[in-house]
Image (spheres, rainbow, N blue to C red):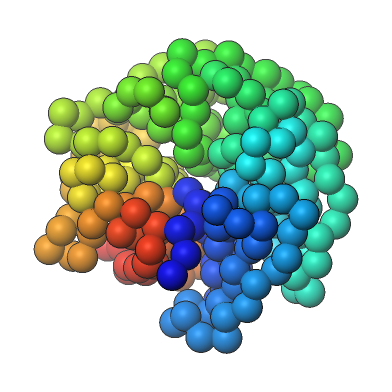
Amino acid sequence: MFTFGADALFPSNRLLLPNYNDDKIHVCQLDGSNSSSIQLRYNPHAVSLYDSYQALVTSNQRGFIEIFDIENLKAGKNMQVGHECKGITSVGGNIYVRDSFSSLSMVDINGVELRKTLTTSDPLCLSLNKANEIYFTAVLDDNVYVIKSDGKERVFYNNPGLKDPYGIAVDDNNDVYVAGRKSNDIHRITRDRKRQDIVLDEKDGIKGPMGLSFNYLTKELMVVNEDGWSIRVYKIQ
């Protein structure tokens, strides 16, 4: 068993699973078959898909992002960004990374910083929508935050029933999904915040959920479950 990080992906029907307890990324099919490991020179923290060919991996407690070729699963160049890269998200060529305490940077694929935002609380997990709005959970509080195109941070969602918000993902309708690690549920909030519901809970097998990742092609939500010891994939209606 492995304890996986807060993000994982499934390009080409594969899972890319960073294990921040060792220096490997684990790869397998959606059903868990054909598993293998990629040896790294560092402990990874999170992974985000950049495009159909490349993934971005942050280096746990180090200040760089490594680019991975998804087809041959080979590491490419490093981008030096900040002091401590952790959570990362990318959509449409835009990359946001938690690069130091209470700081988010927008960078391009060459590592050039385009914008930096100092945050109220230290970002934990990040997710970016197609409108270039970044949503994140926080290390020290139970708020879900959003930074819109004006660069200002706002509280997007706070619900007493959502306990220890952790993983976060945005679907193709810009609905936001948040994992309640201690409330054992997945909350869904519309972009305009007019509708919110609990789409998955304990009766669906949710227990200690951490990372979330949404597959736009299959309309499936992947949940890193049981405090990182298992993976579940759900078709979301």
Percent position (x, y) of residue 97? 63, 34
Position of residue 200 measured from the top left corner of the image (x, y, whole percent) = 21, 56
Q: Nearer the viewer, residue 3 or 30?
A: 3
Quarter of the figure with the C terminus: bottom left
Q: Residue furthest front?
A: 22
- Nearest the camera: 195 or 87? 87
Residue at the image position 61 percent from the left and 57 percent from the top: 22
Q: Is residue 91 left or right of residue 236?
A: right
Pick whichever, 14 or 115, lies toward us: 14
Residue positioned 22% across, 36% down in the render: 163
Residue 81 sits in quarter? top right
Image position, residue 217 (x, y; %): 51, 67
- Do we see residue 91 in this rendering? no
Residue located 55% across and 69% down the image: 15
Residue 134, position in %: x, y? 52, 32
Q: Quadrant of the N terminus?
A: bottom left
Residue 96 in the figure: left or right of residue 102: right
Where 212 falls versus 205 (above or below)? Answer: above
Nearer to me, 202 or 217: 202
